[in-house]
Amino acid sequence: MSAALRIAQLQKERGGEPLAIAVLEKAREAGAHMLSGAVLDPSALVDLVPDFKAKGAPLAADVRRDDIYFLTRTAKFRLPITPPFFQNHGNYIISLNRFVKWLAGLVEAEGIDVFTGFPATEVLFDPPADAGQPARVAGVRTGDRGVDRHGRRKSTFEPGVDIRAKVTIFADGVRGNLTKSLVRQLGLDEGRSPQAYAIGIKELWEVPAGRLVAGRVVHTMGYPLKTEEFGGAFMYSLPDNVISIGLVSGLDYRDPMFDPHIAFQHLKRHPLIASVLEGGQIIRYGAKALPEGGWYTIPKTYAAGALIAGDAAGFMNSVRLKGIHLAMRTGMFAAETAFDAIRRGDTSEAAMKAYDDKVQGSSVRRELYPVRNVHQAFSHGSLAGAAFAGLSLLTRGWWFTDPMPSHGGWTRIRKLAEYYKDARPDPDATMNPVRIDRQLTFDRLTNVHYSGTRHVEDQPSHLIVHDATVCATRCREEYGNPCIRFCPANVYEMVDAGDGTKKLQINASNCVHCKTCDIMDPYQIIDWVPPEGGGGPQYDGM
Amino acid sequence: MILVVAEHRDGALNRASLETIAAAQHAGGPLKIVVLGSGMETVVGQLAAADAAEILIVDDPALEPYTADGFVLALEQVIRAENPERVFLPHTYQTRDFAPALAARVQRPLVTDCIAVRDGGYARPVFQGKLHADVAVDGPHLATFQIGAFRADAMKSGASPAPARKAAIAIDASRIRQKPEAPFKEARQAVDLSQAERIVAVGRGIKSQEHLAIAQQLAQAMGAELAASRPICDAGWLPMDRQIGSSGQTVAPKLYVALGISGAIQHLVGMKGARTIVAINKDAEAPIFEVADYGIAGDLFEVVPAMIAELHKSTA
């Protein structure tokens, strides 16, 4: 949305032949698949929409107070000082999905078409990627509608359309399906470190009056995660006694029985959190992956006719826990590059490199480069990570090996036999069970209800498991089907096959589009592809 | 005088028409009913049961199949001839298609989606149903009524059939601009569970497909429809059109018997409107017991045969 708005602004400023600009959005309405904490650093917003306050930007609250706690199972220890990267003075607590909806309004007011409910499923190349000549991106193809679960055309069938563009800006978010295929086909990740991800699970609560003043920001480390697990929790207070609470867990955990959803339930039972939530009511639930890897994991972000912006490229600062301003800023840079390139009639790879030059010379690099090794240091445990984060304030991120070596998060998960030795658990058991009282704690299925997710039932599964026999045999034996635990929406279930064995059942319509399965599956045989347009969660206030 | 526009398709009266007649009777005063189409004997017969002054029939081949232009042309003439104080219509898709044009043509205000008749006006939901607004209207006007706002069985029947009269109206077919194609239909649902008075629903607790027979027997003994929660339909043990819940049908029968259903919120939203809910489940903590009027925490394979035996005894 920032990119679209910026192009419209450039067009107004500089005039010339009007450009046709379109935004494709897979959600039913703009912002409905957006989920974040969220604390907004307004640095990009003030440049994009200087009069954002007059235009009614939905900024829920000014940050008034920042606290960091270290939690043990029953106790809390407040850090006496808040480290600089955690300081949020001058920032705003927002609902990202309302913020994006607002931006979409500004975009539409500029006469730009926002096509909601139309996911792009394929990148179009002309000439194609395997033709021997340099490939150039020529646009995208949208998904077919009206296909039944067996892949047959229903009476409502409508084929997808090819949308051809001089420049396509890919802002399809964390682990975006288009960016994933673009990076693979053009080898854009060559020489880069593998992206590291985390999964954030979030709930919105309405609590009795007087619990927290609006504008409180609380971050926690420690419990319910083990020291070998990366992550932490957040609790932000919004106006009208609404609390945003969530747990971010690194998708590079070792314990194959780790269950981020259960960990989140344990978090809510901790006295620090429970004392705020008790007597309140859950309003919404959702989950989304985050790109945590930082500077060295960002792929080449340009190709002939194409630019990659925001979370799709991995522009997120995992130390400051912020990415919205970077997404907006890179979207604006992409817009400027695309506009100049089209006006000059040159959208070759060399012309698109201007985008990379802008990023390199900007606040984006100044912010991300010094913390380039921090996430990787956390792979040695949360204490080593925290120590390195502190150290990098002095060293500007330097380390003996720079980039610090790293591996794809999914390669770190251990086999049951390795992790548990002789005490091999039952894959269907819960290692660290939590009492589900349906007041404070919920099972996955109940939570899914609060995400508002909905899909046309009679359509092919949009979660493609390339070899489902692996699930019942190898995976069950080696890893104990971690998908049934890392999926926050009960999509994956191992059900009785009727002959004493288990088989995989995919409840695709529960999916909240978080992308965790595509990222974390130890065999890398799950592909997340967009479902029929409009399907997915219906976030409001998230 | 109130004029109610009745709606029908393929020889069947839309129940919403009866609800609208009930609304008009509630509002009070003389009542006429108009029905448009071609060859409508059954429909007219049904309408004649209502306590109304007269049934007006506009029978013209140009009105079949339905077109917005045709209905506007016909109703404009009826309204000019009869000059009713108010025109009531059911808030159906068809009404939504033509009523705005009709209101503009006769230059009368249109109040849509009403849920109640108030002194000098109506109540209608605003802000997606969060608030009800009272709307006041002066002079002759049109009003449409939300489906379910009035009950069809609250419609008063007359002592004798209402007289029917053919309206003397000519329709210039050349002024109808729409050329309707054959109606488009999604695959029709084989069973409409929303009409069932009693439902026996099975969930995961039934364990295997062979065990469905026992639920089937209970349903038969009770004269109930068989339905299921999502896992049963996902497994293909029952067709999808028997699924109850957020991704299936929403039902409100008089009696709902849940066998081995834990009561996931997705299921509850589809059946919590049932008048009496009976739950049988092994797990006494299951959320289904929170909505059940009668609950048996026990093994359905013991309880259900006993229920069937009792039912047979009482009918024998």
Image (cartoon, rainbow, N blue to C red):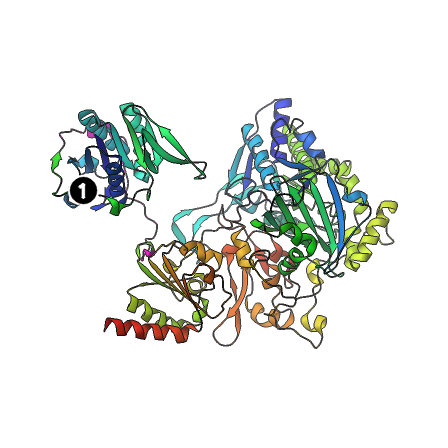
Whole-percent x, y for residue B203 in the image: 43, 65
Residue at image x 70%, y 77%?
A422
Judge whether A89 appears above or below B268 on screen: above
Judge whether A109 appears above or below A134 on screen: above
Whole-percent x, y for residue B276 in the image: 37, 59
Camera-side residue of B182 and B10? B10
Camera-side residue of B266 and A305? B266
Using a 10 Å C-alpha cutoff, classify the residue at mark 1 as few (fewer than 14 neighbours), some (14 to 19) or many (20 or more).
many
Whole-percent x, y for residue B46 in the image: 17, 45
Residue that label 1 marks: B50
Q: Main secondary structure of the magenta part?
A: loop
Q: Which residues are magenta?
A: B167-193
Q: Is residue B23 left or right of residue A106?
A: left
Q: Is residue A500 left or right of residue B80?
A: right
Q: Is residue B177 magenta?
A: yes
Q: Where does the N terminus of chain A fall, quadrant-wise?
A: top right
* Quarter of the image where one finds residue A241: top right
